[in-house]
Image (spheres, rainbow, N blue to C red):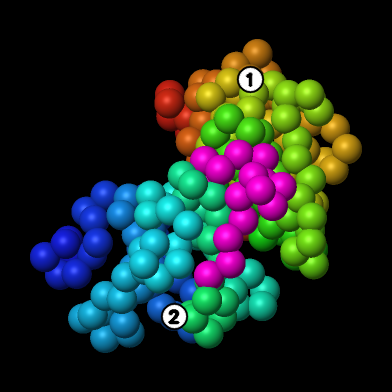
Amino acid sequence: VYTTAQGLPNDDVRNIAEDRKGNLWFVTNNGISHLDKDWKTFTTYTTNQGLINEAGTSMVEDKSGNLWFGTRGGVAMLDKEWKTFTTYTTTQGLANNNVRNLIEDKKGNLWFGTLGGGLSRLDKDRKYFTNYTTNNGLVTDYVWNVFEDNDENIWLATEVGLIRFDGITFSTYTTTQGLGDNVIGDILLNKNGPLWIGTNSGMSA
């Protein structure tokens, strides 16, 4: 068991991720921690080190080795040398600073599910955001999880159903189409076929 007694900045761990070098990262409600390969020492990043907000939610490593952290106050990118943070907020074009989840798609674009601003996409060259809200066809601006399938469709977990974005059109799936529950927490693609959806009333596929 690892808690603040062993060096975690907070016992409320929101996300755990492994980078390509095998390092473990813990996104907590009071900063981001890295556990060394011997599983003995934590190194913590907070606002003192440049993190935009210490209430973390999610993490992804991009194809260049940079680490991206979603927080309740925007997005922080830690360069691959683990030295400098770059901040992305509504000032840079992010739809909403309360970022719940993020992924990098097969083309290198980054997608951010926000709570209140819908869906944001940062282009692969990291130059501009494209935002999608209820004005663009989303049924809600609260996105809890983002997932990409093998056909490059983007799937969104929300509290009002499952949403698929094919790059042009948003399609919504609810209990009317057979979903077990409209409140969705997670999405996973099985390598042999079905898309698994974790709902408040069990699993759907």
Q: Residue 137 at x, y = what percent? A: 79, 25
Residue lying at the far top in this picture: please name it.
176
Q: Residue 65 at x, y = what percent? A: 60, 78
Left or right of 26? Residue 129 is: right
Position of 79 relative to 196 (above/below): below
Name the foreground residue: 183 vs 6: 6
Amino acid of disc 1: Thr
* 91 is within the stretch colored magenta: yes
Position of 148 relative to 21 (above/below): above
Residue 44 falls in image quadrant: bottom left
| Residues drawn in magenta | 85-99
Left or right of 122? Residue 190 is: left
* 98 is within the stretch colored magenta: yes
Amino acid of disc 2: Gly
Q: Specify few, some or many for label 2: CA neighbours under 10 Å numbering under 14, 14-19, or 20 or more.
A: few
- Marks 2, 1: nearer the viewer: 2
Q: Quadrant of the N terminus?
A: bottom left
Name the foreground residue: 149 vs 42: 42
Position of 81 relative to 129 (above/below): below
The residue that disc 1 covers is 174
Residue 80 falls in image quadrant: bottom right
* Residue 198 in view here: no
Please give the name of the residue rendered at 58% of the width and 60% of the height, measured from the top-left corner: 87
Q: How many marks?
A: 2
Position of 23 relative to 203 (above/below): below
Tell me the element at label 2.
loop
The residue that disc 2 covers is 22
Tell me the element at label 1.
loop
Name the foreground residue: 66 vs 19: 66
Name the foreground residue: 143 vs 147: 143
